[in-house]
Image (spheres, grey):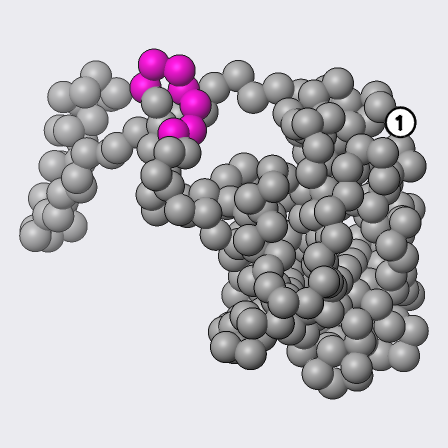
Amino acid sequence: MKIIVCMKQVPDTNEVRINPETGTLMREGVPSIMNPDDKAALEAALRIKDASGARVIGLSMGPRQAEAVLREALAMGADECYLLTDRAFGGADTWATSSTLAAAIKQIGCDLVLTGRQAIDGDTAQVGPGIAEHLSIPNLSYAEDIRVDGKDVVVRQQYDESIHTVRAGMPALVTVLSELNEPRYMTPGGIFDAYRENNLRVWGRDDLEIEDENIGLKGSPTRVAKSFPKSVKAPGMTINAGADESVQFIVDKLKEKYIL
């Protein structure tokens, strides 16, 4: 059994700042990490490997420095990794990204694809389902539990007000919540092997069987016009009074702001 885990190198959002003039992310000096939802997906794949001997393959698309998250995946226990990096892939939106990743997955081949629910630098939750659509395979989202049962994958899905348990024949794609598990740490031996062994392949545009109109900026039907931080809300107020006094206080405030 082969499991491909898609992962993204993202800026640590605790350190991100927005340029107030350009509305773009200021990445200088900001540490990069493996996207948390993707790390949970990797841990889920590694647990399936521990139980059944599956082969786990990491896949990422990004600049050459994204190799760092794949080395981390190898140090955690992944068997091999692929980095898709080429100037032709630059500027890709979620459609072009999912199209490119799907092309790589099709060439590598697998039984199960695991991705994070969403990336913390975009929060679109579109790439995973997009990959499934390009590959014409079932998509099971918001997984809080995953198990393999023969040729099927069984997923418990978490929604706001309900939990669903669903089953799909493989190949299939599952998007994972960061709450699914507690990812393991890298081991010293794993770190050593991650940099010693030749188990990370770098693929460029010429290595993929995909049309130019489906990749990079050219293949992106959407554009990010501007990024901006959330506005800071004024601190709230606590009223220590009875029901009648509290209601009157609220009414007075609404009148003060010309809402009533």
Q: Residue at x 60, y 38 (%)?
A: 63
Q: Main secondary structure of the magenta part?
A: loop
Q: Is residue 194 visible?
A: yes
The magenta span reads: 20-26
Q: Residue at x 37, y 41 (%)?
A: 30
Disc 1 residue type (three-letter): Glu
Queried whether the magenta region covers residue 144, the answer comes back as: no
Give how far across and how far down residue 114 sits, in percent.
72, 59
* Quadrant of the rendering where the N terminus is positioned: bottom right
* Quadrant of the rendering where the C terminus is positioned: top left
Q: Residue at x 87, y 54 (%)?
A: 108
Give left or right: position of 25 versus 70: left
Q: Is residue 255 above or below residue 30?
A: above
Name the residue that disc number 1 marks. 211
Q: Is residue 164 visible?
A: no
Binning the other alpha carbons within 10 Å of mark 1 as few (below 14), some (14 to 19) or many (20 upward) gives: few
Give left or right: position of 95 versus 251: right
